[in-house]
Image: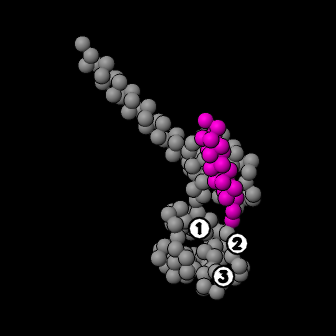
Amino acid sequence: MKVISLFILAAVCSISAHAGMIYVPANSTDNAKAGKTSAANVLGQLDAKTFLALTPAKVQQLTGTRLNFGQKVTLKMAQLEVKKQLKKGKTVNMAEMGKKAGGGINFLWLVVGFFLGWIGVLIAYLTREGSDDNRVKSAWIGFGISALLVILFYVLFFVFWANAAVYEY
């Protein structure tokens, strides 16, 4: 029994010892050498009409990096916001829109919001690092998905339960 517990303790220690390692590039300009630029910088320099015509493939051509799913969704949401502002006749701050479109959705905080609910959203508020931090938005999205699934489950459960009670003899 002691051997098994020592083996499990050694395994846990070896796994947790490597959990905090972060890759730091040897040269801080690796992205610049490869021709990659920040999506927020590129998108912030475009005019509104060009920004509305962007697709994820065009962003990849401009920045040299491929957008993940969360960044694609955020790009479309920012394009909808720009379109609304243009319809209202407001001026659009493209630097701010570029930051929003380049930010994306933080998957970790989406999962925290999904599983912890409003407590996860509270944790996201308490740990955010600035007004442009997207962890709060991601936690709210996760909480919203969780709430919709719970409501859907209850509706389906009570519909089937009510139908079963009607046909019970």
- Which residue does the numbered mark 2 point to in the structure image? 24
Numbered tag placed on residue 101 in the rendering: 1
Q: Which residues are magenta?
A: 1-22
Q: Quadrant of the C terminus?
A: top left
Q: Quadrant of residue 122?
A: top right
Left or right: 63 in relation to 161:
right
133, above or below 94, in the image? above
Numbered tag placed on residue 164 in the rendering: none
Mark earlier in primary sequence (3, 1): 3
Closer to us: mark 3 or mark 1? 3
Task: Based on the picture, tell me whether residue 123 belongs to the magenta stretch.
Answer: no
Q: Main secondary structure of the magenta part?
A: helix
Q: Position of residue 59 (x, y in %)?
A: 53, 77
Q: Position of residue 87 (x, y in %)?
A: 54, 66
Alpha carbons under labels 3 and 2: distance apart: 11 Å
Q: Secondary structure at mark 3?
A: helix
- Which residue does the numbered mark 3 point to in the structure image? 30
Q: Quadrant of residue 48?
A: bottom right
Q: Quadrant of residue 65?
A: bottom right
Q: Are marks 2 and 1 in contact (CB under 8 Å)?
A: no
Q: Mark 3: give few (<14), some (14-19) or many (20+) Cα within 10 Å.
A: few
Left or right: 146 in relation to 162:
right
Q: Residue at x 35, y 28 (%)?
A: 159
Closer to us: mark 2 or mark 1? 2
Q: Are marks 3 and 2 in contact (CB under 8 Å)?
A: no
Under mark 3, the amino acid is: Asp
